[in-house]
Structure formats: C-alpha cells, structure tokens
Amino acid sequence: MDELTRWVLSVDRRALVMRALETSSAFSASEIASRSGRSVQNISRALRELEERGLVECLTPEKPSWKRYLLTPRGRAVLDDLKAIELIA
C-alpha cells in the first residue's frame, strides 16, 4: 500500500468522500453529507484535503458555495487501489 492510499485511510471521512465520488456524477459537500449522515463541515474538510493532494477536482471554483467535485484520474487510481486490497467495497 502506498503512502497516499494510507493517507486516505488514516481519516475515515476521506475514504467516505472518495466512495461518494466514485460515480461519474459531480457532487457538492452538502449532497455527500446528506447521503452519509455526516456534517457539511466534515465533508467540506475532507474535500479540501483531497483537493490539496490532487485526488479530487472542484468543477466550480468560482462559486462561493455549492461547489461540485469529481475524482481526478489520480483519485480514481487510489480508489481502485483501496478496492483491490478490499479495504472499501
């Protein structure tokens, strides 16, 4: 397991967000929070962390709120690694 995969797993909200973004649809922090039962603040923090590492991309950076996110190719590769080692379904 590489360092980036371990980093994602070190805080459960990161893996949760990556799983939510697995589909090709873009989601906002509030949509992920609603689906997961987590707070918007918790999900927003995970999205910022993942974006800083190049795992997610904001599609609407000009908007002050309701930003929409997608996994980057790098993020998809990490998600595939997590699934391959059966750490997430």
Image: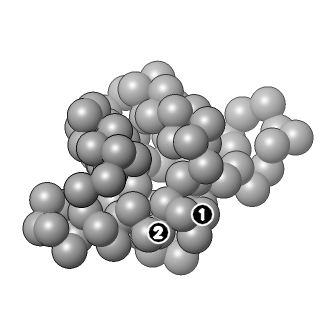
Q: Position of residue 9 (x, y in %)?
A: 25, 43
Q: Crowding near pointer 1: few (<14 within 10 Å), some, many (20+)? A: some
Report the residue at 25% width, 63% height from top.
82
Quadrant showing the N terminus: bottom left
Residue at disc 1, secondary structure: loop
Q: Which residue is mark 1?
A: 72
Instruction: Give the amino acid at mark 1.
Output: Thr
Res 80 visible: yes
Q: Is residue 81 above or below residue 42?
A: below
| Label drawn at residue 20 | none
Q: Position of residue 33 (x, y in %)?
A: 39, 40
The answer to whether 59 appears left or right of 41 in the picture is right
Furthest toward the top, the residue is 41
> Residue 38, located in which quarter of the rendered image?
top left
Q: Front-most of 69 and 74?
A: 74
The foreground one among 45 and 66 is 45
Q: Secondary structure at mark 2?
A: helix
Q: What's the amino acid at mark 2? A: Arg
Q: Quadrant of residue 14?
A: top left
Against 77, is 46 above or below? above
Instruction: Find out whether the residues at labels 2 and 1 contact each other: C-beta distance under 8 Å.
Output: yes
Q: Is residue 85 left or right of residue 22?
A: left
Residue drawn at x 22%, y 70% as measured from the top left: 83
User: Relative to the observer, which residue lies in front, 12 or 31?
Assistant: 12
Residue 88 point in image, percent of width and height: 17, 61
Report the quarter where the C terminus lies. Answer: bottom left
Residue at numbered disc 2 = 76
Picture coordinates of residue 53 (x, y %)? 56, 42
